[in-house]
Image: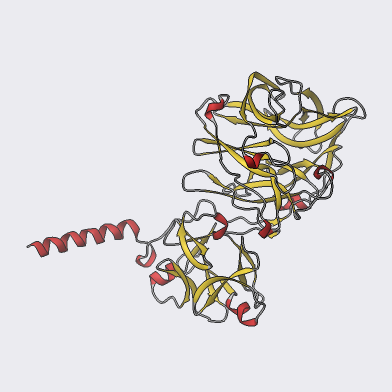
């Protein structure tokens, strides 16, 4: 009797499991990811710092940035982010020959508010180049490259002091301005402030100081919090900002608040204890910072926009070095709902992540150079790979590690490892794959070994191998989604 009851319970559990988890051929199946892979080729623009990319409802991306001459405001537009790299550039405004707005034209941002275009920027005076203040232009016309632009004047704040990097955003129907400014009562360069807006060029109420540079990584060279940028997700408001001097020490920090909190109350904001985005010598990216956020062409991925340099050592004042470049890469999100910036990836094509078809929360990653699938990967870059032309033959691909450039996913004794390319024909063959439609879902991808036809990258007990998939489970284990 007891044995029959046990059999009945077991049968019910099996049936429930089959109903809940069965996919094609009885295998467990993950849903196609909401945010599929997007790739770009960096840099997007040479000699363009403090980049801001805005995707408008007209199907165009609009791009503006600081030019190294610090004398004008430029705009580009294209229907794709990559297209901005070759789009013609239009000067929409030039510095004044004398007086205010006559020097140091910095960090323009373009926004579309209530049917008009607005550009926020910072400028010094011709006779006092360090009298940096914030100003606004208003543009009338559907295309800001050909719009009529009018100066709306200076954004007035609590003090007449060094102020810059204005950005605007809306939370729960309320428009805010955030910016960086020198607080005369503090022994630093700039802190971050926020205020509500009466109109696109006027703040209302008393500005609140929500962050000042106090941590060690915020005070290298200069004590700086600047360049705020806002992205919202899951009921949270995330404000990235830049810290320290504009050399290789430049980096991003992160403030977080609830979208339902009083954003003008400093207590509503918490600060990351460590930078969330910083120099990566491994990928030759130095001093990443002054970012903005945009979205991919399909609207399904968040995209991080920022500048950095391709070298560490700078001769003289970093402000006189013109080689900050505009770059983009996908912004990922952790399971807890917070953004994961990863590392500034190497120049060239941006990397992807590969999630398991049948273990939805697990990604291909390397751990002590052994390839495996794992959830909640940290650091993120351990699970990022650049899909590059195959080392061994045309029409094939190789998977290069994002945080170990020159290291590739290869098989060795049919186990998958991430190892440095030794230049041999054997390594090239072992690290080369044919990209196939997913064996269990054509929307996914499977990778067939170049030198062992019929063997595919698959996970087994969470480790990666190249094996012949002979069952539905094998084929599921060999299927991945690019993210």
Q: Is residue 56 visible?
A: no
Residue at 43 percent across and 67 percent down: it is 476
| Depth order, front residue of 29/411 | 411
Image position of 75 (left or right of 271): right
Residue at 62 percent across and 73 percent down: it is 396
Quarter the C terminus occupies: bottom right
Compared to residue 259, the image places residue 61 above or below, namely below
Residue at 86 percent across and 25 percent down: it is 100
Residue at 51 percent across and 51 percent down: it is 34
| Depth order, front residue of 192/115 | 192
Compared to residue 101, the image places residue 457 above or below, namely below
Image position of 422 (left or right of 29): right
| Depth order, front residue of 252/478 | 252
Q: Is residue 357 visible?
A: yes
Snapshot quadrant of residue 243: top right
Residue 472 horizontal/vertical position (percent) = 39, 71
Compared to residue 92, the image places residue 44 above or below, namely below
| Depth order, front residue of 11/50 | 50
């Amino acid at each position: 009797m007891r044995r029959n009851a046990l059999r009945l319970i077991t049968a019910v559990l099996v049936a429930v499991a089959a109903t809940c988890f069965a996919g094609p051929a009885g295998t467990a199946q993950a849903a196609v990811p909401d945010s599929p892979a997007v790739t770009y080729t960096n840099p997007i623009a040479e000699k363009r710092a403090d980049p801001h990319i805005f995707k408008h409802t007209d199907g165009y991306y609009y791009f503006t940035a600081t030019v190294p001459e610090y004398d004008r405001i430029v705009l580009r537009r294209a229907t794709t982010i990559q297209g901005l790299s070759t789009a013609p550039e239009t000067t929409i405004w030039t510095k004044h020959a004398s007086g205010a707005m006559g020097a140091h034209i910095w960090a323009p941002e373009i926004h579309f508010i209530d049917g008009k275009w607005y550009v926020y920027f910072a400028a010094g005076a011709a006779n006092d180049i360090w009298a940096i203040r914030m100003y606004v232009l208003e543009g009338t016309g559907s295309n800001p490259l050909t719009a009529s632009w009018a100066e709306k004047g200076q954004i007035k704040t609590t003090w007449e002091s060094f102020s810059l990097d204005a950005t605007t955003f809306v939370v729960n129907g309320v428009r805010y301005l955030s910016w960086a400014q020198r607080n005369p009562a503090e022994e630093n360069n700039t802190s971050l402030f926020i205020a509500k807006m009466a109109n696109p060029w006027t703040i209302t109420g008393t500005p609140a100081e929500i962050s000042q540079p106090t941590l060690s990584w915020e005070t290298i060279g200069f004590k700086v919090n600047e360049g705020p940028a806002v992205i919202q997700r899951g009921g949270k408001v995330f404000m990235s900002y830049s810290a320290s001097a504009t050399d290789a020490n430049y980096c991003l920090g992160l403030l977080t608040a609830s979208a339902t909190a009083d954003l003008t109350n400093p207590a509503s904001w918490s600060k990351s204890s460590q930078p969330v985005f910083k120099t990566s010598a491994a990928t030759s990216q130095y001093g990443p910072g002054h970012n903005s956020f945009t979205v991919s062409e399909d609207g399904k991925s968040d995209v991080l926009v920022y500048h950095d340099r391709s070298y560490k050592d700078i001769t003289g004042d970093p402000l006189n070095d013109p080689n900050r470049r505009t770059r983009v890469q996908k912004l990922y999100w952790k399971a807890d709902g917070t953004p994961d910036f990863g590392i500034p990836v190497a120049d060239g094509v941006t990397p992807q992540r590969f999630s398991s078809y049948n273990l939805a929360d697990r990604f291909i990653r390397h751990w002590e150079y052994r390839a495996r699938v794992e959830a909640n990967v940290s650091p993120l870059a351990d699970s990022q790979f650049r899909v590059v032309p195959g080392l061994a033959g045309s029409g094939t691909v190789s998977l290069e590690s994002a945080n170990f450039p020159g290291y590739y996913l290869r098989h060795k004794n049919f186990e998958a490892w991430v190892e440095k390319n030794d230049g041999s024909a054997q390594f090239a063959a072992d690290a080369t794959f044919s990209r196939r439609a997913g064996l269990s879902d054509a929307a996914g991808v499977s990778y067939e070994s170049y030198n062992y036809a019929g063997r595919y990258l698959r996970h087994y007990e969470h480790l990666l191998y190249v094996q012949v998939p002979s069952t539905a489970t094998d084929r599921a284990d060999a299927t991945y989604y690019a993210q």
